[in-house]
Amino acid sequence: MFPTEGLASHPCFVGFDLGTSGARISIIRLSDDSSGYQELHSQSVSWCDEKRYDDPAAWMSAVAILLEGSAEHLSSVASICFSGTSASCLLIDRANAGAVTRLPRMYDYDVRHSVDPIYGVRALTRLESFAPPQHTTRSPTSSLAKLLAWHEQTPLSKHEALAHQADYLALQFLSENKACGSGPSNFRSVSSDWHNCLKLGYDVRNMCWPLWLLACLSEANIDPRNVLPEKVVSPGQPFGTISRRMVEQFGLPASTVIVGGTTDSNAAFVASCPSVAKLGTAVTSLGSTLAIKQTSKNYIEDATVGVYSHRFPSVLMPASTSEAYWLVGGASNVGCAVLRQQNFTNEELRKLSLLIDPNVDTHYRYYPLTKTGERFPVADSNKKPILHPVPSERAAYLHGILQGISDVECGGYLALTTLGADPPIPHTIFTSGGGGQNEIWRIMRQRRLKSTFKENVQVLRAQNSEPSFGAAVLAAAHLHVS
């Protein structure tokens, strides 16, 4: 436990999110009635160049710019949390102060489609010999697949270690003191969290690196003790205190705690929901693609349709609960991107939505993909978009597309039910993303979900769904666990 003496009377908590388009900071504090969190400051910066989203120097530059723009709040900061894109990772030199040895391979890097795919093919072949069926590490974009492909290309040195995007940023801020996870002089060890390590093979049920993973690495002549994060904690659980260098550079308190990070989608879930977990709470993200997540008593997994379970952060669990909760979900290729593809403008969407009766079904049965291929709630690489016939009235066409996306959402929650989510029916669904602003669509979706499950399902708009806000909530949570 980290000491709380020396904290400001109204401490602030900082969350960073680094995404594909830029970086954002949120600074929050506990609301006056202690019922939630108040956002004091939020700011974002865009990457100047499309390639900079995978540049560690650009990550740190963005964080520095955001902290400098938040100067009036920094003297009261108690803790900091970083969120990054899932399975984005790089290799560092543990013996040289964490210097980057191999540049990041980001969330969408597919080892089969690299410059020389033979290394990725070898990595996946090795994985198939060790990873359990349906395991998320079998994906060609997993952290473990990237690690093995790096090793196939050029064998890892004994000092190289894997760090995820959020791990790397935390490492830059952590104190060099040995008590905070680092050794003497320039030697640094990596700390990580449950969410980022899931796609590296961490066993989130038994809280350890599984034997199959250790055997896989050893058989490839990789020492697991060197390459894997030394410490894996709950998102929001303290790693250690901030370094003197960062205190001097930004004017942060020397007592500032760096906590375990998370991934962007999980941070968005935390931002969208109340601060304490309730089973059956769900979030639907209506962005370019549709993604759903739900809290469950049961762990479920099926990599063939992209369903896996993150362990819910212990710092957000109800004080009376000792059992684990799971954040289960999946993501479809259907989503709001199809509206742009069909040339709907923002103004048109606003006006035409008002012409739709959300309590009446359209007879059009669309499956609104932007291109061939679906991953969830069914995995079918040959599934084709169904966007015909096209009615003469644009409002009728919009009605059909919105209903089609709603039906995929219903199918997604039914898939989680079939795989064993508990409770099987979400009682409250918060909506994030651009589509969450459409009130007519919210009413339509609520009606169709009620019809699907034959029970009352409440659909609400999330008040805040920025991953940086969710990361800030995790930064605050370790101090407010009762």
Image (cartoon, helix red, strand yellow):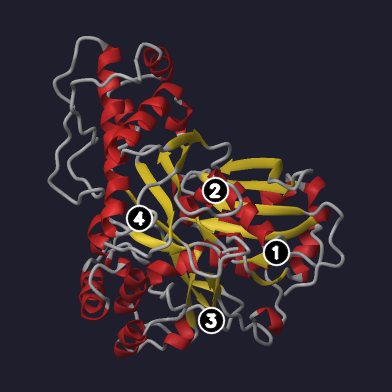
Residue shown at 35%/61% (left/top)?
Answer: 308
For the residues labelled 3 and 1, the Cα–Cα distance comes to 28 Å
Check disc 4 and report the residue beneath it.
108
Check disc 1 and report the residue beneath it.
482
For the residues labelled 1 and 2, the Cα–Cα distance comes to 24 Å
Check disc 2 and report the residue beneath it.
467
Q: Amino acid at mark 3?
A: Glu
Frontmost of labels 3 and 1 is 1
Q: Nearer the viewer, residue 402 or 53?
A: 402
What x and y, as percent, mark residue 349? Answer: 39, 18
Secondary structure found at label 1: loop
Question: Which is nearer the N-term, disc 2 or disc 3?
Answer: 3
Q: Nearer the viewer, residue 75 or 297?
A: 297
**Is 7 on the left-hand or right-hand side of 202?**
right
Frontmost of labels 4 and 1 is 1
- Check whether the beta carbons of the residues at disc 2 and disc 3 lie within 8 A of each other: no
**Is 22 on the left-hand or right-hand side of 309?**
right
Classify residue 446 by image quadrant.
top left
- Check whether the beta carbons of the residues at disc 3 and disc 4 lie within 8 A of each other: no
Check disc 3 and report the residue beneath it.
230
Frontmost of labels 3 and 4 is 3
Classify residue 344 by image quadrant.
top left
- Check whether the beta carbons of the residues at disc 3 and disc 1 lie within 8 A of each other: no
Quarter of the figure with the C terminus: bottom right
Label 4: how many residues lie within 10 Å, few (<14), some (14-19) or many (20+)? few
Frontmost of labels 2 and 4 is 2
Residue shown at 48%/86% (left/top)?
Answer: 226
Secondary structure found at label 3: loop
